[in-house]
Amino acid sequence: MKKKWSKFANIYKNLKLNAKLFITITLIMLTTLVLVLGGLQYAFSLYDEQLYTKSSQVLMMSSNSIEKELERVEELNYNIAVDPQIQKNLIELHKNVNRYDLYRLEQEIEDELAKYVSSEKYIQSIYLYDLEGREFLAGSSSNPIKKTDRNLALLQADKYAGENYWRELEGNNGDLISVRQIRSYENLNFEKIGHLLVRVNLDKIVGDLPKPQGEIAGNMVMTKKDHVFYSEKGMNLPKDYQLQAKKNQGYGIVNINGNRTFVNHIKTDFQGWTYWSIIPFNVMFAKITAAKYTLVLVFMLMFVFLITLGFNFLRKITNPILDLATTMQEVQKGDFTVVHSLDPSMSNEDEIGILYRNFKTMIEQIDELIKENYSKQLLIKETEFKALQAQINPHFLYNTMESINWLARTNKQEQISNMVQALSHLLRNSLSFKNDIITFQEELYIVNSYLTIQKYRFDDKFHFQMDISSGVTKYKIPKLILQPLLENTFKHVVESSIDVSKIELRAFQVEDRLFIRIEDNGPGIDPDIIQKVQEGKVKPKGTGIGLNNIDNRIKLYAGEQYGLKIENLSGNGTAITVVLPAQRGDEIVL
């Protein structure tokens, strides 16, 4: 993650000022927008809590009012069941009566029931059944109770043994029946003498409740065990949709009929019913949503305005700087004439004008210095390069080596012949000034020739290992830099050691640099000697080639950032690393 942020930071640093301004203002605006929207969201959550609290209070009041009315119906149901006249008529009906008495008793019972119906506006009808199953009705008979519902209600009433039982009527939105078994109170024998059903219009009770105004005015739905038995105003819920209350009280935003809906619920102890308040989201949050979108639109307009204003202001600053940067790039390529194309109008006394004038003066002075010193510096560099390379020329002749090789072959001395051939190849490359820069592969040929000679000289006294990465052998390097390093290793490690010496030559590429590393397991180099070598204070002994000589040649060839690095290994031994640019011919490999 840290690397990714570092990568993005580098990309941002390299962008143009216009792009940086755009990104910076965008991030500031987006951050501000996120903070504002976050604050609004927090405010909306607080508003949701307040809305939930208010709607819960309304729902609680509504449920209390409904249950209070239903409790009144229960009380009326009980009063009918214990009414002396009703009790007397039911007991008399239990006896053998003639048709006249049956008609008289029927009239008396229905007249008595009619009094109770008229006293309560929410009672739709009252049904009374004697033991023979005869039905006595008071109130509306336009929508009679289904026989199935009636039988189930009477069966449940017997299970409750005289207590009230509420039943919801299937297919009748909001119709409830209060059912009770009628028992005889004569002589306190409590024998069953009939059944009483009181049908209540729940929709009318809900319709008479005081309705809140504004955002918390929703539709009421009532459920029992996740089954909807009443919905206000005939609100249609999807058939496969269930209102599930995991807690006794709560709220949430759900999707009903494809619309976001605010749903609040409360569960009471009365019959295990759950009361729901369903408020369409677009109705409840219409104003808030409009405010939110307005705020976003204002921010977008502000963003466009600030970007336009910022670009117009910054263009006056960045355009001259961009022109100056373009001119610098051309100057970097060696074209100093572009300095005359700078805008002459940029002669203001501000920072940009001062920068323009100073840059122009500087380029003109540099151009003059280059013209005066370019030829001189090239001549000096070439002379130094030839002088340094001349130090490595041997003092014996190649033709003599050829004669010795011919004589060795004539006398069948293969070892002497191989050594002379290797030495001849080594001398041929040393004496040749035709090519100062060769490929790494050609340098390896010189190394192999030198190693051939040393193998015959030291036999099995050393073990040489080479690890060359693929592709690096085509890179160009100064001629004759590895053989002197190996010669130095043989002189200070192999010659002075009684054990088998190990020498390893490795070459590899890292990005745009070629690393050639020679490691040995010798006694190492005194740190003071290393410092003196780096400072050029140590000179080669005899006719050898000094490390400082090789380092200078590399620097003359490639630049001051390249050269030799000498280090003592953690165990025993020394590592000398040659650092060169990875290039083929005049092209640098990236």
Image (cartoon, rainbow, N blue to C red):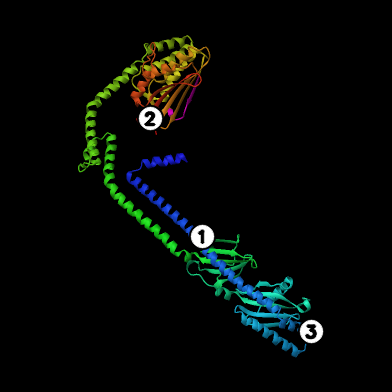
Q: Is residue 423 magenta?
A: no
Q: Which residue is mark 1?
A: 49
Which one is in front in this view, the residue at disc 2 or the one at disc 1? 1
Cα separation, mark 1 vs mark 3, equals 64 Å
Give the magenta range.
464-472
Disc 1 residue type?
Glu
Q: Which residue is mark 2?
A: 584
Residue 532 vs residue 555, the one in the foreground: 532
Q: Is residue 171 visible?
A: no
Q: Quick check: marks 2 and 3 in contact, CB under 8 Å?
A: no
Is 284 placed left or right of 274 in the picture? left
Give the image quarter of residue 10.
Answer: top left
Q: Residues within 10 Å of mark 2 (few under 14, many from 20)?
A: some
Position above or below: 393 against 116: above
Q: Give the tally of numbered discs.
A: 3
Is 586 placed left or right of 142 in the picture? left
Q: Which residue is mark 3?
A: 95
